[in-house]
């Protein structure tokens, strides 16, 4: 068994869709980034890659590569899961938290779980998505950006 942790944060900006967990969330701003800037999926991808000691999302999908400009992070997460599989790993479970003052995400977390599970090829019962605020403290509390953390447990299918 191997465990990895991931963290990501993006600035909120006018004129962008807000994508979190593969869901478009109604909001007056979206996250700024080279891809769709889905902070939750980026943190999960980093947790998975870290657990397998395969680098990070920036190494696998560099922002200097125009192939990834505006790409859906669901595609990036699916490719991350496929990369782990090629290296002999399977995903046991994922636990994640989105940190945002607004919008409220509780009505979206179940669909996010399903999206993540589908991209990773695992059951939704193996994916946890939580949301919290920082009580108006810091960059998330002042609504300058949104952050996410994730932990992933994987196993090496080639080892006994």
Image: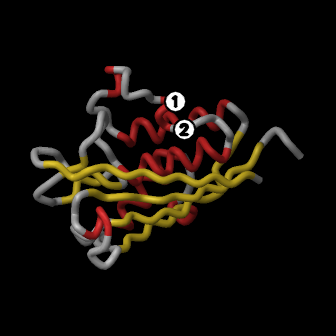
Residue name at image x 26 percent, y 32 percent:
70
Relative horizontal placement of residue 25, taking residue 94 as reference (left or right): left
- Color theme of the render: secondary structure
Residue name at image x 68 percent, y 51 percent:
154
Residue name at image x 68 percent, y 39 percent:
53
Helix, strand or loop status at disc 1 = helix
Helix, strand or loop status at disc 2 = loop
Q: Position of residue 16 (x, y in %)?
A: 16, 45
Task: State the CA–CA distance, disc 2 to disc 1.
Answer: 5 Å
Residue name at image x 53 percent, y 52 percent:
6
Q: Name the foreground residue: 142 vs 156.
A: 142
* Residue 18 in the image: above or below residue 111: above
Asked if marks 2 and 1 touch (Cβ < 8 Å), the reply is yes
Q: Position of residue 68 (x, y in %)?
A: 35, 27
Seen from this angle, which residue lies furthest right?
A: 160
Seen from this angle, which residue lies furthest bottom?
A: 135
Q: Name the foreground residue: 85 vs 57.
A: 57
Crowding near the residue tagged with mark 1, few <14, some 14–19, many ≥20 C-alpha atoms within 10 Å? few
Residue underneath mark 2: 56
Q: Position of residue 77 (x, y in %)?
A: 46, 41
Seen from this angle, which residue lies furthest front?
A: 138
* Residue 84 in the image: above or below residue 151: above
**Residue 59: which disc?**
1
Relative horizontal placement of residue 97, taking residue 85 as reference (left or right): left
């Amino acid at each position: 068994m191997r465990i990895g942790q991931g963290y990501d944060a993006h600035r909120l900006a006018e004129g962008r869709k807000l994508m979190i967990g593969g869901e478009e969330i109604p909001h007056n701003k979206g996250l700024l980034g080279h891809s769709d800037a889905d902070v939750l999926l980026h943190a999960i991808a980093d947790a998975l890659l870290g657990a397998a000691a395969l680098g990070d999302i920036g190494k696998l999908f560099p922002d200097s590569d125009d192939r990834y400009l505006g790409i859906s992070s669901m595609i990036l997460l699916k490719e991350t899961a496929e990369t782990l599989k090629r290296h002999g790993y399977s995903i046991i479970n994922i636990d994640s938290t989105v940190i945002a003052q607004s919008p409220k995400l509780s009505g979206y977390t179940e669909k996010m779980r399903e999206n993540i599970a589908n991209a990773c090829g695992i059951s939704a019962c193996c994916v946890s998505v939580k949301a919290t605020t920082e009580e108006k403290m810091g960059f998330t509390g002042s609504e300058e950006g949104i952050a996410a953390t994730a932990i992933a447990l994987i196993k090496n299918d080639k080892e006994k």
